Amino acid sequence: MPPPAPADANTAAPRQIGRYDVRKLLGLGATSRVWLAYDPLAEREVAIKQILPHVLKDNTRGKLYRHLLVNEASLAGKLIHPHIAQIYDAAVEGDDAYIVVEYVPGGTLEQFSSRGKLLPPSRVVELMFKCTRALDYAFRNNVTHRDIKPANILLSGNGDIKISDFGAALFSSNDMTQVAGVGSPAYMSPQQVREMPLNHQTDIYSLGVVMYQLLTGQLPFTASNNYSMVYQITHVEPPPPSAYRPDIPSSLDAIVARAMNKQLEGRYATWSEFSHDLAHAFRNRALNQNAEEESGPERLRILRGMGFFADFGEAELSEVSRTCDIERVGSGTAILRDGDNGQDFYIIAEGEVLVTKRGCVLGALMPDDSFGEMALFSRDEEAHRADITARTECTLIKLNEEALQHVSVSCRMQFYFAFLHTMSERLNQANHRIATLMGSNR
């Protein structure tokens, strides 16, 4: 989305665009404006990107931007991923052309791409990791973005990211006429500026440029004209990020260099390789220190000491740290009640809780046990079917289903594996108790 801009006489908000109730102007660019609107049918806020009338009337640009909009609209309902902004609707009618997308309220990564406003390296690695997972998902659905840049990576209110603006996307699974001559030169791969055939590795290069900029506050190449830019992209090697920022470890220099390798054979061949190196770099001691400063040393200390999170990597633990709440409750505190709405679940860090049903004790749960997690797997709105009471003073890790939907796929899968292990242990214990009871009755 374009950066926010004040409304003026030429951008007075219409009452409606299609069926959508317009609320305010979010941003104004050279070719489009973005409105915050409300969809009364779906009962949600949306963002509407509307092509400016004078652009549509231009013989050349009008055709191009209509094509871009139709290209993006063709993906409506096809790319469903927690780190991709959803496309809901579009219309191209005469001098009116707009697309309706998910409203993401946190702005774009542009706000963190200049010196003085840089994020900690650990945070950059986390955001880039999420981008690799989203773009790998798009690639597996035969889509190459072709216009990856900070302005097209949105920040949600909880600090997560969503990739947007698939208008320039390349589709490898159909014969749809592809949009040519689009993209942002500073982020283009050598193959893209040379107008060579492209695959997902062009997005890998572009994300490498984004990572370079977020780490250093400047682009790897700057030029006064496109010819000079093309020459630098194809022939010049930029300084490593650590040349501008000494706190950047060599592991990140190596990742950026490989992502931005000018030759396809030297660049990451798959998104999985890129993701793997980012996750591995996060375990670097220097990055871990930054992660603790950002997420809070106490939370990470607690999580690292728990058996439940033993198989979680540092990147995943950092996600949990930012997503969870730490609750300390006294002995006798009622934590969950039979029939409560099943939104929250807990992992015990310290202490012991009792599980009861209608006054009968069913069992006790110890550190690293979880409870309430069946809410994730049940369709029943009242998924909690027992009372949970603190038997001693307890330290609890509290999350909910909605929060779990906003962490990375790898983090969510680690939760599911841990829950399956917990349920397996409970079944084994139940079988042992049944066998013991049956034996005592013979």
Image (spheres, grey):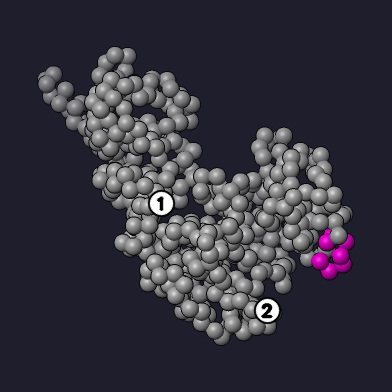
- Does 130 appear above or below 370? below
- Relative side of 390 to 128, left or right: left
At horizontal 76% and vertical 57% (from top left) the residue drawn is: 32
The quarter of the displayed image where residue 419 is located: top left
Q: Amino acid at mark 1?
A: Glu
Residue 259 vs residue 373, the one in the foreground: 259
**Closest to the observer: 46 or 245?**
245
Q: Position of residue 30 (x, y in %)?
A: 76, 61
* Mark number displayed over residue 208: none
Give the crowd class for mark 1: few <14, some 14-19, many >=20 residues within 10 Å.
Answer: some
- Quarter of the image that includes the C terminus: top left
- Check residue 294 in the rendering and tell me which mark sits there, or answer none: 1
* Kind of residue at badge 2: Ser
Residue at the spot x=29%, y=47% of the render? Answer: 301
**Where residue 322 sits in the image (x, y, percent)?**
42, 45
Q: Which residue is mark 2?
A: 224
Q: Visible in this render: residue 263?
A: no
Q: Could you give the CA–CA distance between mark 1 and mark 2, rounded to whole angstroms?
A: 37 Å
Asked whether disc 1 touches disc 2, contact meaning CB atoms under 8 Å apart, the reply is no
Q: Which quadrant of the structure image shows residue 387?
A: top left
Q: Earlier in the sequence, mark 1 or mark 2?
A: 2
In the image, 143: left or right of 212? Answer: right
